[in-house]
Amino acid sequence: MNAVLALEDGTWYRGLAAGALGEAAGEVVFNTSMTGYQEVLTDPSYAGQIVTMTAPQIGNYGVTAGDAESQAPRVAGFIMREESPLASNWRADGTLRDYLVRHNIVAISDIDTRALTRVLRSAGVMRGVIATGQVDPEQLVEKARAIRKMEGSDLVREVTCDRAYEWRDRAPAAGDADHAEFGLAPARRASRRLRVAAYDFGVKWNILRRLDAYGCDVHVFPASAPARELLATEPDGIFLSNGPGDPAALPYAIDNVRQLVQSDRPMFGICLGHQVLGLAVGGETFKLKFGHRGANHPVKELSSGKVEITSQNHGFAVDPGSLPSDVKVTHLNLYDGTVEGFRHTSKPIFSVQYHPEASPGPHDADYLFQQFLESMEKR
């Protein structure tokens, strides 16, 4: 069946339906990862976004339960150059197309994703619509222009958990078994089980797996839970997760994190958690032209000069000029010089913009979990 992708600037592409039938609307972005499409599909940070994969063929190793990063795909839609009809992988339990159809994700294939990516890099990411069947591209362009903008959107409420839970009680067995066998062994584990209270802004499961692997019992809280509820568990540390949308549109989260900062407990933030922490300590955030999404982004650790190849997924960044004097920038993106990490000079608080837990991506930054471990043990 035919399908059309239309963008708000009037650009449109005709291709083939590669998933569920119907319409999908959201901000069209691109991801440069060569593998890891299932992790991308199930990453809650992609809520509200139609993801373009720049790798030329997607779906060739199928899908498997152990590679999911949440209960189900979270993307608004999916774009591919070529959809592989075969799933060649001994771990696979289905094809990508069947997976997309089962979870009602509208997708399009057989379009020039290189051309689309050049448009998004030049003009910036923009709103778009995918529709299957016989549709009028011009009408789809008008629909794209009516979609809510990412700036000012609170998408966290759509992906956060509905009640607090212990990760070990809810961890999916298939995922844990796979990651125990194929995952990276931690450099060391905590000398005792440490209690971590984590805000779920749209957390990826592999973050929780990594904290567990390092010896932490993780108590996960909804994004709107008051700070006092986290502190009532007497945690050794606080974790702020990744998630979708505009961090400045989360006043409730910013206020709660500001209170937690005053508690002087060790705190570690990733992605949206990094941005919320930046706002909580007095900084400001801004929207990037086309964001950072992929598994090969170079980041420089300023204290050592070491360059890490990192996994990234974000469309907003912290303004370094807005940070107070007691907050020090620790990491920079070598593509555009944006802030990739900071640390408080007098409190045991730090965060990074990228994803040290990978899934997909390299493990260069896994040491950050050990740093969080050490800060909790010191306290």
Image (tube, rainbow, N blue to C red):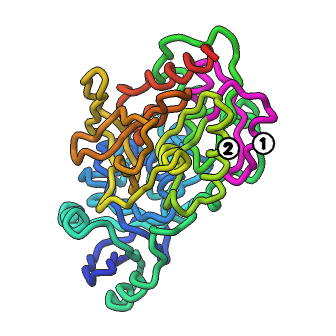
Q: Is residue 204 above or below residue 104?
A: above
| Quadrant in the picture for residue 343 | top left
Kindly indicate whether the residue at mark 2 contacts the one at mark 1 (C-beta within 8 angstroms).
Answer: yes
Instruction: Say whether residue 21 is left or right of residue 294.
Output: right
Badge number at residue 366 = none
Q: Which mark is residue 228?
A: 1
Figure quadrant of the C terminus:
top right
Residue closest to the eye, 84 or 260:
260
Q: Which residues are magenta?
A: 209-238
Q: Answer few, some or many: residues within 10 Å of disc 1's Cα (few below 14, many 20 plus, some between 14 and 19).
A: few
The residues tagged by marks 1 and 2 sit, at their Cα atoms, a distance apart of 9 Å
User: Residue at (36%, 67%) from the top-left corner?
Assistant: 28
Position of 280 with respect to 294 (left or right) is right
Q: Which mark is residue 259?
A: 2
Which part of the image, by quadrant, shows the N terminus? bottom left
Q: Is residue 19 visible?
A: no
Is the residue marked by circle 2 packed among few (<14), some (14-19), or many (20+) residues within 10 Å? some
Frontmost residue, 129 versus 202? 202
Indicate the position of residue 72 as horizontal and vertical percent values: 58, 52
Residue 223 belongs to magenta span:
yes
Instruction: State how many labels appear.
Output: 2
